[in-house]
Image: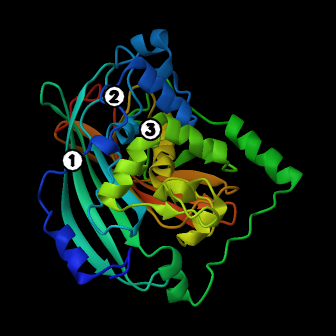
Amino acid sequence: MAWGEITEERLAEAAALIGQPLRRSRLQWIETATRDAIRHFAWGVGDDNPLWLDEDHARASPAGGIVAPPCILYAVDMTIVAPKLSGVQWIYAGTDFTWFDRIRLDTRFEVEARLVRQEVKSGRRFARWVLQTGEIGYRDSNGRQIAKAVGQVARTPRGEQLKAERGGEVAGAGAHRYTAGELEGIEREILAEQRRGPEPLFWEDISVGDAVPPVVKGPLTITDIVAWYSATQGAMPYGGAHGDAVRYRRRHDDYHINPETGAKDAAGRGHLEAATGRDVGMGGAYDVGPQRIAWAQHMLTDWVGDHGFLHRLNVSVRRPNLVGDTIWWRGRVTGKREAGGAMFADLDVEARNQADAVSAFGTATVALPSRRKGPVPLPLA
């Protein structure tokens, strides 16, 4: 049985874990939403919303003090549920987050994660691959549920097996070469980011079809990816460093072979190195799926302002976002409703790159203050 091969035996080993609580220590970068953790996450995604960073601003808001960006939960637990299948590449496929309350300063989290589903699939990119789905619950130290997430991970061939499937080397994607005018336009859009802040966005004042002001991220650099890792993961999902890494790779049989040295290296090295990114079938160095999803949260929390609340964000990641790509996150209101005493707006969200190709897409639900009903009633049911 070849290392990294998807076999019935390995599938059965993983399936035996469905419904069982899973250990999470290597997928948790922080336990508590400290001031430092909040600031570092905001810096890591390029979101300088004063609700996360400015104590005076936050104290005057409905939150009454600094709160964390909702997607900081990726630093609490990466939502990667991908057990067994040693040596098989994992690629993040999406998250369905639901938040019930704000993440307040110094909230300490307890996490429970389970594998809930495993499906064998085939497609154009990979002849045979596996989709693993996990559920993660986030509770505070008093046992109150703050949020839940459903995370999906694709388990795909890598390296020599992938080359054999495709009949040779995996080609890299050609980088987009920007003109000076394109770069100037992107920078203008980035600097023109719209944030509502303390001005309420009332439910009565929005209409189906309304557009959400976009958030622009890019052109993506290795520095951007390192900033994300620094804020949310470090090296932990890939086994840590030095002796920790050796022990992890021996225990989990999860690594990448450096073709130049023959040494074992982190399976996530493809995010930072183009050759390894091609080796795992992504076309070059590429971003981290949760990083891109957090940019959608950036857009939506800008739009709803201090008085609104992001209740749900369900995003599927559909193609690699390579170093050099630029992403435009946009949204549009698709519905309005009242439920459980709260006033909600439903949205479609979509990320497109500089070639106008869809990079990620999904839906979102926000709770808004109402001229008739008053502020958002947190926590939500």
Q: CA distance from mark 3 to mark 2?
A: 38 Å
The answer to which image quadrant residue 138 occupies is top left
Mark 3 vs mark 1: in front: 1
Q: Residue at x 26, y 63 (%)?
A: 133
The amino acid on which the numbered mark 3 sits, given as a three-letter code, is Thr
Picture layout, residue 72 above or below residue 36: below
Q: Quadrant of the C terminus?
A: top left
Colour basis: rainbow
Q: Nearer the viewer, residue 54 or 6?
A: 6
Q: Residue at x 46, y 30 (%)?
A: 305
Number of numbered discs visible in the structure rendering: 3
Is residue 97 toward the left or the right of residue 173 in the image?
left
Mark 3 vs mark 2: in front: 3
| SS for dot 1 | loop
Q: Which residue is mark 2?
A: 371
Q: Which residue is mark 3?
A: 232
Name which of mark 2 and mark 1 comes first in the sequence: 1
Is residue 275 toward the left or the right of residue 117 in the image?
right
The amino acid on which the numbered mark 1 sits, given as a three-letter code, is Arg
Is the residue marked by circle 3 packed among few (<14), some (14-19), or many (20+) residues within 10 Å? many
Q: Which residue is mark 1?
A: 23
Q: Nearer the viewer, residue 134 or 9?
A: 9
Q: Nearer the viewer, residue 87 or 52?
A: 87
The amino acid on which the numbered mark 2 sits, given as a three-letter code, is Arg
- Which residue is situated farthest in the top direction here? 56
| SS for dot 2 | loop
Name which of mark 3 and mark 2 comes first in the sequence: 3
Q: Residue at x 48, y 73 (%)?
A: 158
| SS for dot 3 | helix
Name which of mark 3 and mark 1 comes first in the sequence: 1
Is the residue marked by circle 1 packed among few (<14), some (14-19), or many (20+) residues within 10 Å? few
